[in-house]
Amino acid sequence: MRIARTTALAGAAALLMTALAATPASASADQPRVHLLTSDGVLSTRSWSSPLLSQNRVRVTGLKARDRLIGMDVRPATGALYAIAASGQLYVLDPRTGKATAVGAPVTITGTAVGIDFNPVVDRIRLVTTSGQNLRLVPDTAAVAATDTPLAYAPGDRAAGSTPQVSGAGYTNSVAGATSTTLYDLDSRKDALVTQGTIAGVTPVVSPNTGQLFTVGRLGIDVGRTNGFDIATLDGRHRAMAAVQPEFSLLGGSLLVKVDLDSGRASVVGFAGGTVVGLAFA
C-alpha cells in the first residue's frame, strides 16, 4: 500500500498554506506548546496552532559518546523534559539550553524504534518498542519498575493474530494530579491508532500492563515509522499530534499530523523540516 500522488500533493499543499497563514502572533496562550527533536540534534519549541514555525531552537549537548536520542516526553509531575537514547540511557533535557543530563544506568531496549510517555497517575515512564517490548521505568533512577507482557492485539480485536509494530505512545490527562488516563499507541504496520488496555471508565478494565491492544481506527495514510506521538489535554479536550515517516514522500523528512482519538484518522499539517526523532507537548 502506498500514498497516492494526490495525497502527497495534498500534504505539500497543506505545508504551504499553513506556512503562509501562520505567524508567531497566531499562537495563543491557551494553545499547547510542542517540543520537536530532529535527527541532527536540534530541539525546537513550537505551538499547536503553528507547529511548522520554530519559536526557539537549541542544539542538544552533553550526550554520552556515540549516543543518539530516539524519543522524549514531558513529566507531568515536574514539567521536566525527558529523552531516551538508542543505548537505553535516559536523559533530562533543558529546552532553553539543550543541555542533557544523564539519569541512572541504561536499560536494555529491543526493536528499532520506541514510544515513550509518562503515566500521569503513577508518575512512571511507559516504554514500548517495535519488537513488542513493554516496560515501566522509574523516572528518578531509570530503574525498570516492571517488565510487562509484550504487546499483542487482544483476542476478538479485528487485528487479533497480527504482529504489531508500535513506536508511538501517549497518555491522556497528562497533568500533575491526574486520577485517570488512557494509553494510546500508533501501529505503523497496520497504519492504525490503538489503545493499550481499555479506555478509562470502560469495564471490564484491561490494564496497559497486559500489553493488549485494541484497534480504534485507521490513520488513512501509509506510515513507515512513527517518530513521535503525544497527547495534550486542555479543558477536558484531548489533542494528539504525531511525527511520522511516510512510506512514500517527494520531499523527505517527517510529516506532522494531528490524530483524532475517536476515529484514528490523521490530518496532515505539513513537513517538519527534518527527520523528527522525538515529539512532546510541553
Image (spheres, rainbow, N blue to C red):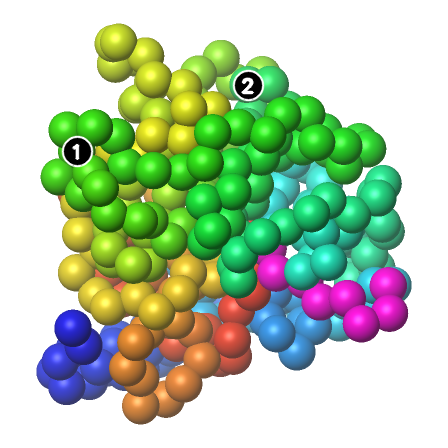
Confirm whether residue 29 shows in the render.
Answer: no
User: Hey, which quadrant is residue 220 in on the image?
Assistant: bottom left
Q: Secondary structure at mark 2?
A: loop
Earlier-in-chain disc, 2 versus 1:
2
**Residue depicted at 32% across the width and 73% down the height:** 246
Of residue 14 and residue 220, the one placed in the foreground of this image is 220
Boundaries of the magenta span: 64-71
Is 136 or 45 nearer to us in this picture?
Answer: 136
Q: Residues within 10 Å of mark 1 (few under 14, many from 20)?
A: few
Question: Residue 177 colored magenta?
Answer: no
> Residue 256: horizontal and vertical position, in percent?
38, 66
Q: Which residue is mark 2?
A: 121
Q: Main secondary structure of the magenta part?
A: loop
Quarter holding residue 207: top left
Front residue of 56 and 150: 150
Residue 65's place in the image compared with 26, above or below, is: below
x 53%, y 56%: residue: 111
Q: Which numbered tag is attached to residue 157?
A: 1
Q: Residue at x 67, y 72 (%)?
A: 42
Q: Amino acid at mark 1?
A: Asp
**Left or right of 179, for residue 72:** right
Direction from residue 221 to residue 141 in the image, left or right? right
